[in-house]
Amino acid sequence: MKIEHNDLVKFVLHHQLHRYRDRGKEGVLASIKQLGYLQIDTISVVERAHHHTLWNRVGDYRQDWLDELLAEDRAVFEHWGHAASYLPISDYRYSIPRMQRFPDTSSWERTFFDQHSDLMDGILERIRNEGALGARDFSDTRAEKPGNGWGAVKPEKIALELLLWRGDLMVSRRDKFQRIYDLRERILPDWVDQSPPTEEELMRHFILRSLAAMGIATLYDLRNYFVSKANDRMAQYLDKLVATGEVVKAEVRGLNEAHYLLPDALETPVEDTRERMYLLSPFDNLVIIRQRVKRIFGFDYTIECYVPPKKRVYGYWCLPMLFGDRMVGRIDCKADRREGSLLIQALHWEKGIKPEGAMKAALDGALDRFARFCGCGSTRM
């Protein structure tokens, strides 16, 4: 099968952005299931990444819907996707292998567990007896408190996080974005499959789930959409799925790497939305694999909040701008909620882009909508 590059771009956009049509809380859950995971981020320069990503897909999005799906409906849970993420609770069993490897995923985590085993046991006992608790409910018992890096974080908070990753605890709810933890057995619905998957089942899940989310992908994309310890063996499982016809191998004109897709994927109509401008979160699933974005869109994107100030080119929180089927620029925004204004700190158009007519009108409309989403009544340069 051969695919033209222009069709590839539209195909990718349909599967990762345009196909989301459900509204309300059901639309939020449908979007998370389609994406496979929703990355969580603490930075709130504009609106946090998980809300931002859903806002671009669920037209009437409300933040409390995501909170309800976690705390009341138990339809999603927090664990590791590409990074710390919301995942469909129905996919819980595919997180178990990572939990089982923990804390041997790093020497630092193993050392912490070995040095603080009594602390871990005490935390679990308190939650068992008192109910769901957050980090603020545990006092910092250190005699000396280092002031930098992880040393500034009290061991009790670290222990809660590590017990979450090991699967002993789950997030019961968020309170002003702070995690409130409870025992797994009091959170996880009885109907959820808790049987650990085999390596083949795990790889099959990652491959099929990633292809459903991305529409079409290379082996590199599949290895990096979800992060898996076993992804070095993903190629052999991908070959098996191609051999059985569950995955189709394709050639994209102008690109050397083989691409893969699900058999029914090309039957999905590709929608043209050229009159809309998307201001994407840096952690949006569409742009999270930076090499993929560069390969497909020719857009070399780096989030610069992690770059030293003197080396920044586009701004601390520069957002990719998508218009139609092109990445047309990046815009650095900051929500000044005290003054009620969305500050436009920098705007950079890609080479060859002329922001006129429909594109300019689309940007104005996008900024107006984005300002309201960020709790601001106006925009200001």
Image: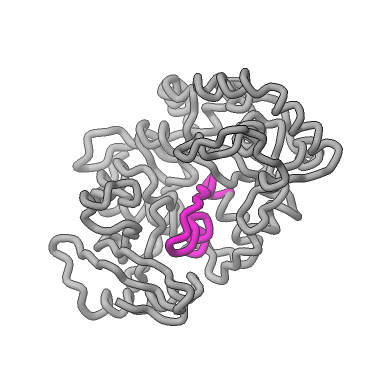
Number of residue marks:
0
> Relative to 58, is 83 above or below?
above
Return the residue found at the far front: 143
Q: Residue at x 26, y 77 (%)?
A: 360
Q: Report x, y in % for residue 375.
A: 51, 74
Colour approach in the figure: one colour
Judging depth in this view, the residue of 245 and 190 nearest the camera is 190
Q: Report x, y in % for residue 43.
A: 46, 54
> Relative to 293, is 93 above or below?
above
Is residue 55 in view? yes
Is residue 298 in view? no
Residue 330 left/right relative to 365:
left
Residue 123 left/right relative to 303:
right
Start-end of magenta stretch: 33-55
| Magenta-colored stretch includes residue 259 | no
Q: Residue at x 68, y 47 (%)?
A: 136
Return the residue found at the far left: 352
Q: Residue at x 34, y 36 (%)?
A: 259
Judging depth in this view, the residue of 281 and 143 nearest the camera is 143
Q: Quadrant of the N terminus?
A: top left
| Magenta-colored stretch includes residue 51 | yes
Q: Report x, y in % for residue 239.
A: 42, 23
Q: Quadrant of the C terminus?
A: bottom left
Q: Report x, y in % for residue 202.
A: 57, 27
Residue 79 left/right relative to 152:
right
Q: Residue at x 28, y 58 (%)?
A: 315
Judging depth in this view, the residue of 252 and 280 nearest the camera is 280
